[in-house]
Amino acid sequence: MAIVIRGVFDGKVARPLPGEPIPDIEGEVEVEIVLPQPNELHDPVAELFRIRANTPPLPFSTADLVRLSREHEEDSD
């Protein structure tokens, strides 16, 4: 069974991420380094801004949304 250890690789040395559990290793072990495809490397904050920019605004205000939610809660009681 394979053990997955997330880490960083600078082209020469692989280091585990902080807090990543590492089993006791004696001697050398075979490893497989899987590099993400270029389209998998992205900035999460930039991705959120991209999604926000491509999402049309709601057809009603936030205040209306809260009011409608409260009215719905009252009706379901």
Image (spheres, grey):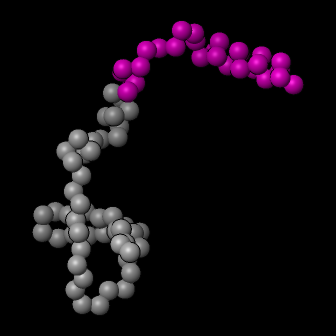
Q: Is residue 76 magenta?
A: yes
Q: Is residue 30 left or right of residue 58?
A: left
Residue 16 lies, in percent from the top left, at 31, 69
Which residue occupies 22% across, 86% down?
28
Q: Is residue 67 above or below residue 28?
A: above
Q: Is residue 7 above or below residue 21?
A: above
Classify the position of the C terminus by image quarter: top right
Q: Residue furthest left?
A: 12
Q: Nearer the viewer, residue 66 or 54?
A: 54
Q: How many numbered marks, from 0 up?
A: 0
Query: In the figure, residue 20 lies in which quadrant?
Result: bottom left
Q: Nearer the viewer, residue 1 or 38?
A: 1
Q: Residue furthest bottom?
A: 26
Query: In the figure, residue 12 lies in which quadrant?
Result: bottom left
Q: Is residue 4 magenta?
A: no
> Looking at the magenta stretch, what is its main secondary structure?
helix
Which residue occupies 58% across, 12% down?
61
Q: Is residue 66 above or below residue 11?
A: above
Q: Nearer the viewer, residue 8 or 30?
A: 30
Which residue occupies 33% across, 27% down?
50
Which residue occupies 35% across, 40% down?
44
Point out the stretch of residues depicted in magenta: 51-77
Q: Residue furthest top?
A: 59
Residue 64 lies, in percent from the top left, at 65, 12
Query: In the figure, residue 11 lies in which quadrant?
Result: bottom left
Classify the position of the N terminus by image quarter: bottom left
